[in-house]
Structure formats: C-alpha cells, structure tokens
Image (cartoon, grey):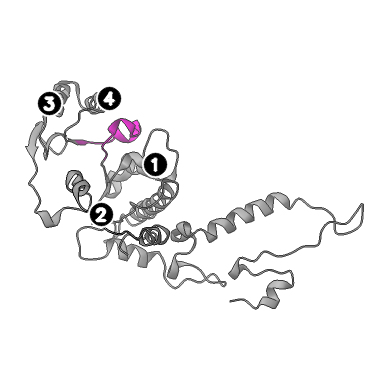
C-alpha cells in the first residue's frame, strides 16, 4: 500500500486510486485560475468506478498480464495464446454463462479480437490458424449477436464470418432464436444444422437462408424428434435428415431441465440463502 502521508499531500496515488487534490479557483482575477477540469474529472471518476468494479477485472486487472508502474508485464500475449490454443486438448471452453450482458459483449469481443488478429499476422507461421484451423463455437448467440446489438462481440463475429476463411478461423453460431441473429452473420453461414423449430418466424429465417429448391424441407422442422436435425449446405452433398447419438448420462453438460414434478413434491428442509448470495457476489457457482 502507498504511504498515507503521500496520499494526503495532494499528489494522490494511482496504485490505490486516490485522486490528487487541487486548490479551488480564486475569486476574480486571483490565482489559481478556473480551468476546464470538470469534464476530465467526470471521465476519471467513471474510470475509477470501472476499476473498482470486480466484473471488469478481466480487462482492467488481468493479473500477470497487468503492467506495473514502469509499464512492464510479467506475461505477454504469447502466454495468453499458449493457454488458449497451445495445449494438446482438441477443445478450449470459455464459460461466460454468469457474465452480465453488458460485460459479456466487451469480454467476448476482446477474446475474438485477440484470436483473429493472431490469425491474420501469423498466417505464414506454423502456429497460425492456416496450419491449425480453428472453429469458434458461439453458444446462446442471440444474447450478443442480436439485430439491435452494437457491441464489440457482434462486430468481431461479423468480421470473422466475412474474412475468417482466408486465415483459418471459422464460426459456428448456435441459437434457439435464429430470427434474433443479425442477418449479415446468418448470410455467411455455409451450413445450416436445424433441430426442431416450432416458431413460424424462426422457420422463416431458416427458410430464407436456404436455396429456393430446398426451402420445402423447412416444413418438416416442427415434427422432428428430440435429437433429430436437418443438415443443409456445404457439409452435406444432399439435404440430410439425421439423428445424433445420445450421450451417456454422465456426459451431459450441466444444463438439463429440472425435474419439476419431483422437486415440487419433495420435502423442504431448513434453508440458508447466505451461500446463494455469497456465490452471486463472488461470481462462483462452485461454492
């Protein structure tokens, strides 16, 4: 921590987010003159509130990647990319399900920006995505790729959808509401895998994305069974109706619906909501 005496002499201390203090403007023509510091102070106060908000720590306090007061960092972007892409596992999962939407678009946009820029500038290197093609799967895409969304995530997904093929980066858009996804992004999807869709508006979007000769296959979407899908596009030589293999019970993600009838009929014991609030505040569902 900074010496309190240093913080109290008016100079402030950036390590502890203590602002400097200035003399008030003098009366009439006496010094100090009144300056236009109000707008600057508002911006600094806004930045301070962001620095104190732990939900922005991923951007403003990234641990070993955060520069010290000399501007030096313990780790650089190469270590970050190695953590994401340089391991021997086929999949890297970013769990952003608990991130509020306002922060989600900023975080996801920053991640996609780093990956895509590395693909562009490393396209002639063995570590580049042309040598190691990368598919980015975007779950619950309607949260951050909606038509009304203007965030950084949508901008980066549009760029990857338009230009990513040249650099070895692809995008898979996964959503329960295709009618909410930006049309520019949907138009770049070369393959459509559609499960059961009952909503007529969503079916219309899928139909518009198919060629005219295949639009009739959309009529079968409401009657598909659980696990069945229709595949149309570059990944299938002909329109294909298939059924995915059912996963073992222990391989499903933690996203199954609760057993409502069973839970409502169960006896309720004494409950302590302090753990729930603690998990909420700490942004940690594991505790």
Boundaries of the magenta span: 175-192
CB contact under 8 Å: marks 4 and 2: no
In-image side of 191 versus 49 (left or right): left
Tell me the residue at 51%/72% (across/down): 72
Tag 1's secondary structure?
A: helix
Tell me the residue at 72%/51% (across/down): 38
Name the residue beneath numbered marker 2.
268
CB contact under 8 Å: marks 2 and 1: no
Asked if the stretch drawn in magenta spans residue 186, the answer is yes
Marked residue nearer the N-terminal end (4 or 1):
1
Nearest to viewer (mark 4 / mark 1): 4
- Whole-number angstrom distance, CA of label 2 to CA of label 3: 44 Å
Q: As displayed, is residue 255 above or below residue 228?
A: below
Residue 150 placement: quadrant:
top left
Asked if the stretch drawn in magenta spans residue 270, the answer is no
Marked residue nearer the N-terminal end (2 or 1):
1
Tag 3's secondary structure?
A: helix
- Whole-number angstrom distance, CA of label 2 to CA of label 1: 44 Å
- Number of the label disc, if any, that sits on residue 201: 4
Name the residue beneath numbered marker 1.
154
Mark 1 is surrounded, within 10 Å at the Cα level, by few (under 14), some (14 to 19) or many (20 or more) other residues, namely: many
- Whole-number angstrom distance, CA of label 3 to CA of label 4: 15 Å
CB contact under 8 Å: marks 3 and 4: no
Tag 2's secondary structure?
A: loop
Residue 202 placement: quadrant:
top left
Mark 2 is surrounded, within 10 Å at the Cα level, by few (under 14), some (14 to 19) or many (20 or more) other residues, namely: few
- Whole-number angstrom distance, CA of label 4 to CA of label 2: 41 Å
Name the residue beneath numbered marker 3.
220
- Dividing the image into 4 quarters, which one contains the C terminus? bottom left
User: Percent from the top left, x then y, of residue 252?
Assistant: 16, 53
């Amino acid at each position: 921590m900074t010496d309190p005496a240093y913080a109290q002499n008016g100079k402030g201390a950036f390590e502890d987010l203590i602002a400097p203090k200035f003399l008030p403007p003098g009366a009439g023509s006496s010094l100090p003159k009144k300056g236009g510091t109000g707008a600057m102070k508002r911006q600094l106060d806004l930045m301070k509130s962001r620095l104190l908000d732990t939900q922005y720590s991923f951007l403003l306090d990234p641990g070993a990647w955060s520069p010290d007061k000399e501007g030096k960092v313990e780790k650089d972007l190469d270590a970050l990319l190695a953590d994401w892409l340089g391991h021997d596992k086929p999949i890297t999962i970013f769990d952003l399900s608990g991130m509020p939407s306002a922060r989600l678009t900023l975080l996801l946009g920053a991640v996609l920006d780093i990956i895509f820029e590395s693909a562009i500038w490393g396209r002639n290197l063995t570590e580049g995505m042309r040598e190691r093609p990368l598919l980015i799967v975007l779950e619950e895409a309607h949260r951050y790729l909606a038509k009304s969304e203007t965030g950084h995530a949508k901008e980066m997904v549009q760029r990857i959808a338009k230009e990513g093929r040249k650099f070895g980066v692809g995008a898979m858009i996964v959503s329960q509401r295709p009618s909410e996804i930006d049309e520019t992004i949907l138009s770049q999807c070369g393959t459509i895998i559609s499960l059961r869709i009952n909503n007529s508006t969503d079916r219309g979007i899928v139909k518009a994305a198919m060629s005219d000769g295949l639009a009739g296959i959309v009529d079968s979407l409401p009657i598909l069974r659980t696990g069945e899908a229709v595949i149309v596009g570059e990944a299938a030589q002909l329109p294909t109706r298939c059924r995915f293999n059912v996963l073992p019970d222990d391989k499903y993600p933690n996203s199954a619906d609760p057993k409502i009838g069973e839970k409502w009929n169960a006896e309720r014991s004494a409950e302590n909501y302090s753990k729930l609030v603690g998990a909420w505040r700490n942004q940690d569902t594991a505790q």
